[in-house]
Amino acid sequence: MNRVRMIPMILLSAAVAFPAAAITVEEAQKLLEELDVLMTFESRDFAAVMTMISEDPESGVTKHVVRQYRRDSEDKFLMIFEEPVTQRGQGYLNIGDNLWFYDPESRKFSHTSMKEQFGDSDANNSDFGASSIAGDYRVVDVVDGTLGKYEVYVLNLEGVNNEVTYPYQRIWVTKDTHLLLKAESSSASGRLMRTSYYPSYASVEGKYIPTRMIFVDNLIEGKKTQITITDISLADLPDSLFTKAYIERVNR
């Protein structure tokens, strides 16, 4: 049985200070590698339920419930919508460099991108796979800071490939636990696109998963998505689950 320990992190109204950094850029890059290890389940499968509440000033409030499955060792994940009824059975299947979206009405798979938005939310498809920050970004500079009651490193990052969702990121990482608390994501022109918050984590067998995520759209005032993750399991999953045939079967 998996032992899940909840770790709350209150930070949404925090101020940030920027004194000189206590670590070098090289050490900060190693910190990214450690963060990836902490949030990646290399030897275990992962499953959970995601409840997504999206607020849009035009369309109002919407709720989605999604089943999430991951096999980080093979770079695979599967996401299947359970609510609302109008989207039940829709799914995203990622295998390596290929990501497909399945529509049960047309019974067809369409190729999509990790950069695209997940459903109608402010999350991106890239938010749900194994953490790969160290491989996708290089540290430009790092400074010390505070975020609420937490002492943090504030790292400015630059993408190193064309596959990243955002070319530039600024992230806040705790000094003691090396967990991601906040991220500001910017376009190639430097325009702030989205701010992400990770107020709470669950500790499962030495790994960490954010149990609450808040994605704020910086282009449309009042638009945001909050995701709560529950029913976490590290039980083995069947190989057949990470296949197109499985998604088609659950929709019959």
Image: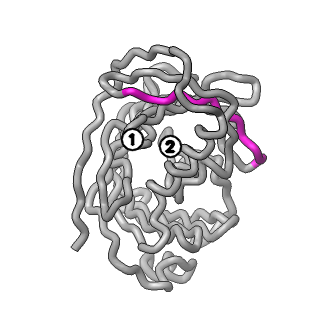
Foreground tag (1 vs 2): 1
Label 1 to label 2: alpha-carbon separation: 9 Å
Q: Is residue 225 left or right of residue 119?
A: left
In magenta segment, residue 156? yes
Q: Is residue 87 left or right of residue 3?
A: right
First-in-chain label (1 vs 2): 2
Question: To which quarter of the image does residue 74 belong?
Answer: bottom right
Q: Position of residue 103 (x, y in %)?
A: 55, 65
Q: Position of residue 71 (x, y in %)?
A: 49, 71
Element carrying mark 1: strand
The residue carrying mark 1 is 213
Q: Main secondary structure of the magenta part?
A: strand
Write the residue at 53% across / 27% down.
22
Q: Nearer the viewer, residue 96 or 249?
A: 96
Q: Is residue 119 visible?
A: yes
User: Is disc 1 in contact with disc 2, using a CB cutoff of under 8 Å?
Assistant: yes
In magenta segment, residue 103? no
Query: Which amino acid, by three-letter code, is at mark 1?
Result: Met
Span of residues in magenta:
151-162
Write the residue at 39% across / 41% down.
213
